[in-house]
Amino acid sequence: MRESKNKNGEMPGSFVNISVVMAVWRGDSPDQISAAINSVLAQTLKPTEFVVVVDGPVDTNIDVCLASYYQRGEITLLRLSENVGRGVARNHAIHATTGHLIAIMDADDICRPARMAQQLDFVLRHEVDVLGGLISEFDQVVGDNVSIRKVPQDHDSVCRMLRRRSAFNHVTLMFRREIFNQIGGYGPLNYVEDWDFYLRCENVGARFANLNVVIVDVRRAISRRRSIAYFREEMCVMNDAYRRRQFGLADLCVGYTLRVAKLFIPILLYEFVDKHILRR
């Protein structure tokens, strides 16, 4: 069921054709959801629309939180009767938007105020289909334990990294609707739907880039990246890329070896590598 109460069909004061989408589920915190929404509403360049998809049943506190923004006409709500996972939930939200540019937001992170303006400026000046940027990770409050996850900036460097792992910080993503439609949106995944999305975009000739500037502050979530479910999805994504001939046999073998090692190395060693090497 879709709830839409945007005044005149758009965000107040918004003339830029950008649609922001965010998925919320029962495991999210109302306080963090509010911080995430507020960071989008406080952008120096307002999005045209902001669609929040509620992925299955949630508790009363989340409903009350979202209702306040909906009643003020600041968001559009799309409710799903059951939990379908982040990839499929985002598809529902994106299909409910009208913008030519789609910006992704997560329910527990915080956009920096100039994010939309910086990304739109770059997209308009360059031939790019998928654009990301840097993130600064924190534990409890922004700035308490900073680590920057750097990603390659140019198209060729992005494609090289995609052979091993994600070359974007997904919460920073902005992409053209045409490329989303061309690949059929996100796959039915809940952990590495982003990596799968980038690889399928590459497979149809999308042009990539990353801004070399932090545009989102992100809550650290190392434990999720070491789960069995996460591992299984990574295997599926690599196998699909191999069948599409995006991965060679060597890429597949290296990818399998690194993922198995990630599951079994001591957590303290993994945290050190994650913070000081992978997400510096």
Image (spheres, rainbow, N blue to C red):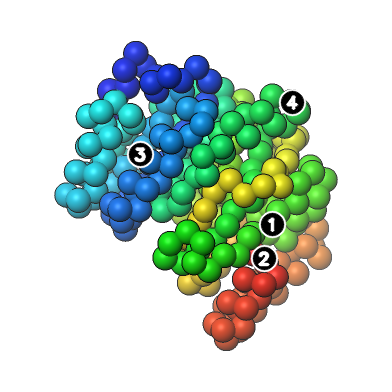
Secondary structure beneath dot 4 equals helix
Q: Which mark is residue 53?
A: 3
Residues at discs 2 and 1 in contact (Cβ within 8 Å): yes
Secondary structure beneath dot 1 equals loop
* Distance in Å between CA atoms under marks 2 and 4: 29 Å
Residue 260 makes an appearance in the image: no
Instruction: Give the amino acid type for the residue marked by disc 2 in the picture.
Output: Arg
Residue 16 makes an appearance in the image: yes
Task: Give the number of the mark in front: 2 or 3.
Answer: 2
- Quadrant containing the N terminus is top left
How many residues crowd mark 2 within 10 Å: few (<14), some (14–19), many (20+)? some
- Quadrant containing the C terminus is bottom right
Residue 125, given in percent of the width and then of the height, sits at 74, 25
Which residue position is annotated with label 2?
A: 280
How many residues crowd mark 4 within 10 Å: few (<14), some (14–19), many (20+)? few
Q: Earlier in the sequence, mark 2 or mark 3?
A: 3
Q: Is residue 233 left or right of residue 31?
A: right
Q: Residue furthest top?
A: 8
Looking at the image, which is closer to me, 22 or 136? 136
Residue at image point 76% right, 46% down: 153
Residue 170, given in percent of the width and then of the height, sits at 57, 48
Task: Give the number of the mark in front: 3 or 4.
Answer: 4
Looking at the image, which is closer to me, 41 or 79? 41
Q: Which mark is residue 150?
A: 1
Residue 87, given in percent of the width and then of the height, sits at 47, 46
Task: Give the number of the mark in front: 3 or 1.
Answer: 1
Q: Which mark is residue 125?
A: 4
Residue at image point 40% right, 46% down: 36
